[in-house]
Image: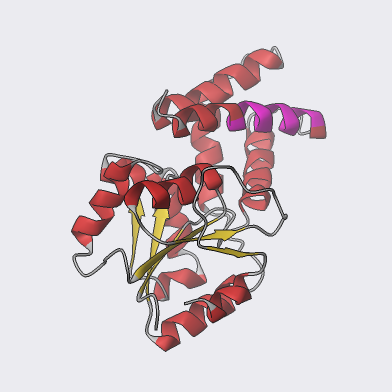
């Protein structure tokens, strides 16, 4: 095999995060008597994306993001609700939302059968991601998960991938492949760490100047020909 170690991003690479997020948000709205409308979810989604982008740039903490998004959302709708409780219930519901992307399970089963060692590399909230992994088909296929808040650093920083490499002393710049959908965290992170990478790009988004992309796939099944 070319790459013994496969480091997979989770959301939007293995899991259908938009589906999980929408359903968790709807459940939170019902719990707190908040109108669940397309406009309300769009407002939350825009706020959420803006704050996570700031996190990826190292400007804010994850704890700030998860609470502040509900502070701004409730203010935008002029609603008097407890943002901490809304966030708590959303995260609890999100942890129950396990929706693998098309072909993700079959591809990972084949990779496992071939002898690849697979790990999750994610910036997600630890409690949510641990819950989702335990309740998913991937629990038996992946050997572990490296979550940013437990690592003390986040993708795309070199420090995050240095942490991963300390836990996996057999991993080298020749035998590992980072697989993910995000140019700003997964691919940039692999570049920062000097690791080969595969961009999962089902939407056909344009490449970014100055970024090394070793492989690009639109369907997870294409990965089987690369590794």
Magenta-colored stretch includes residue 9: no
Residue 125 in the image: state x and y as whole percent.
43, 43
Q: Quadrant of residue 216?
A: bottom right
Is residue 122 visible to the viewer in this orientation of the structure?
Answer: no
Q: Is residue 156 left or right of residue 225?
A: left
Left or right: where 130 falls relative to 225: left
Which quadrant of the figure contains the N terminus? Answer: bottom left
User: Residue 204: x percent and y percent?
Assistant: 72, 55
49 or 92: nearer the viewer: 49
Q: In the displayed image of the protein, which residue is found farthest to the bottom?
A: 113
Where is 206 relative to 35, above or below?
Answer: below
Q: Is residue 118 above or below residue 52?
A: below
Question: Can residue 138 be seen from the camera position used here?
Answer: yes
Task: From the viewer's side, name the closer residue of 32 and 59.
Answer: 59
Judge from the rendering whether residue 76 lies leftward or rightward of residue 143; answer left or right: right
Residue 113, percent from left and from top: 43, 87
Q: Which residues are magenta?
A: 39-49
**Residue at (48% x, 64% y) in the render:** 135
Secondary structure, magenta segment, majority class: helix
Q: Quadrant of residue 7?
A: bottom left
Which residue is drawn at the image coordinates 51% and 21% (left, top)?
68
From the viewer's perspective, tell me whether residue 75 is left or right of residue 134.
right
Residue under the image location 59 percent in, 31 percent down: 48
Residue ID at (48%, 51%) = 187
């Amino acid at each position: 095999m070319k790459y013994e170690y496969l480091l997979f991003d989770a959301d939007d690479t293995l899991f259908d995060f938009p589906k999980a997020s929408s359903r968790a948000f709807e459940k939170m709205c019902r719990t707190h008597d908040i109108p669940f409308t397309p406009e309300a979810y769009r407002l939350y989604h825009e706020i959420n994306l803006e704050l996570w982008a700031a996190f990826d740039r190292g400007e804010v903490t994850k704890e700030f993001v998860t609470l502040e998004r509900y502070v701004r959302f409730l203010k935008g709708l002029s609603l008097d609700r407890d943002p901490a409780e809304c966030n708590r219930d959303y995260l609890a519901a999100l942890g129950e939302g396990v929706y693998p992307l098309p072909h993700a399970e079959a591809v990972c089963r084949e990779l496992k059968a071939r002898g690849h060692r697979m790990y999750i590399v994610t910036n997600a909230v630890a409690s949510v991601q641990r819950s989702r992994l335990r309740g998913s088909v991937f629990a038996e296929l992946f050997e572990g998960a490296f979550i940013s808040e437990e690592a003390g650093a986040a993708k795309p920083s070199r420090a995050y991938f240095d942490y991963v490499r300390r836990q996996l002393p057999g991993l080298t710049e020749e035998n590992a492949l980072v697989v993910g959908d995000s140019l700003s965290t997964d691919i940039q992170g692999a570049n920062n760490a000097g690791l080969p990478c595969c961009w999962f790009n089902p939407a056909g988004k344009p490449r970014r100047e100055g970024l090394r992309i070793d492989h690009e796939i639109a369907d997870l099944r294409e990965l089987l020909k690369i590794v």
